[in-house]
Image (tube, rainbow, N blue to C red):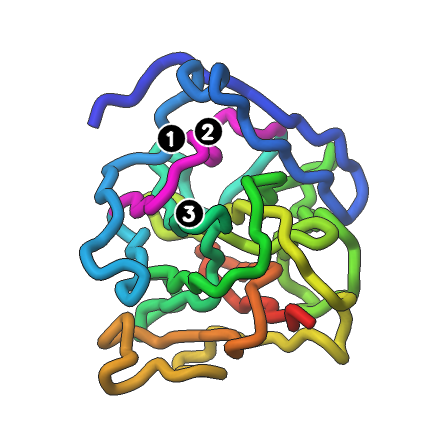
Amino acid sequence: MTKLATFLTIGICAATGVTGCGTEPESSSDVAKSTEGLNTFLGCPAGYPTSALPFDTGTSQCSTSGDWDHTGIISPRAFYTSDDGYYFAAECGLASGSHDYVVGISARTSVARAHSAKCSTNLHGVGTPSSRHYLSRVNGLGQRIDDRGYSTYDWDPGYIKAECGFHEVVTGVAQLESNEIDAISCNSASVGTGVGPSTCNVLKFDFQNHCLQACSGSSDWAFGYYKNVCGTGQYIRGVSKSGPIGEIHAILCCNWN
């Protein structure tokens, strides 16, 4: 696919500490000016929402809010792997006036490279995209930093984290062509409880399934891959990654109420 030569840099974060400031979604007029970073469009898979959204070799979108991850989207930034300008994303659909949201992510069995995202259609007043957060942020000293829209607690010590803002949930996930996990797209939602160790739990990608709701047999939405799935009354709030190749390390599941 042809790579466009024009870059649009938006939401530049001047963070110099350990926490980033997120990036606001692009307006519809800005989308046309953006570098085509999200590539190899696969559309919405047949069988959605029962089917998962693969994003390891292409972009699966059941709704689209523009090109929200590309080379010039934030600055400064750094990757463990090389940035060749190609990014793949999974983005949940929109129905009944409420956006679907990500409730599970699968990864390869040989190395923790993200493979697909599972969306939930439960109605929780999930609105339009309200922020994006990136796992490739660095400060002025070139040090990798978290990008957390609302600082809660250190739910994965020692690893880089991207976390949605106050009363936001993950509705999309993106990574580089190298499968280095890179970004989350967050939407406002009707979250009825706070965020902390008593209302959230961490599911790590440690080469086994962690399914807090069905993910085997007829409910296996990513056969042959390890799956982390939040509970039926939960949503994904954050994602972390590890070096030296930028694998997905964990997801943060939090209670709706």
**Mark closest to the chain's N terminus, 3 or 1:** 1
Residue type indicated by callout 3: Leu
The numbered mark at residue 94 is: 3
Which residue corresponds to mark 1? 37
Q: Residues in magenta?
A: 58-75
* Residue 230 place in picture, x, y as percent: 51, 74
Residue type indicated by callout 2: Thr
Per the picture, the main secondary structure of the magenta-coloured stretch is: loop
Q: Nearer the viewer, mark 2 or mark 1?
A: 1
Residue type indicated by callout 1: Gly
* Residue at the outermost bottom position: 217
Classify 10 Å Cα crowding around label 3: few (below 14), some (14-19), many (20 and above). Answer: some
Determine whether label 2 and label 1 are within 8 Å by CB: yes
**Mark closest to the chain's N terminus, 2 or 1:** 1
The one of 237 and 240 positioned closer to us in this rendering: 237
Residue at 43% of width from left, 64% of height from top? Answer: 120
* Residue 112 place in picture, x, y as percent: 40, 67
Magenta stretch encompasses residue 215 = no
Q: Nearer the viewer, mark 2 or mark 3?
A: 3
- Drawn side of residue 143 relative to residue 210, left or right: right
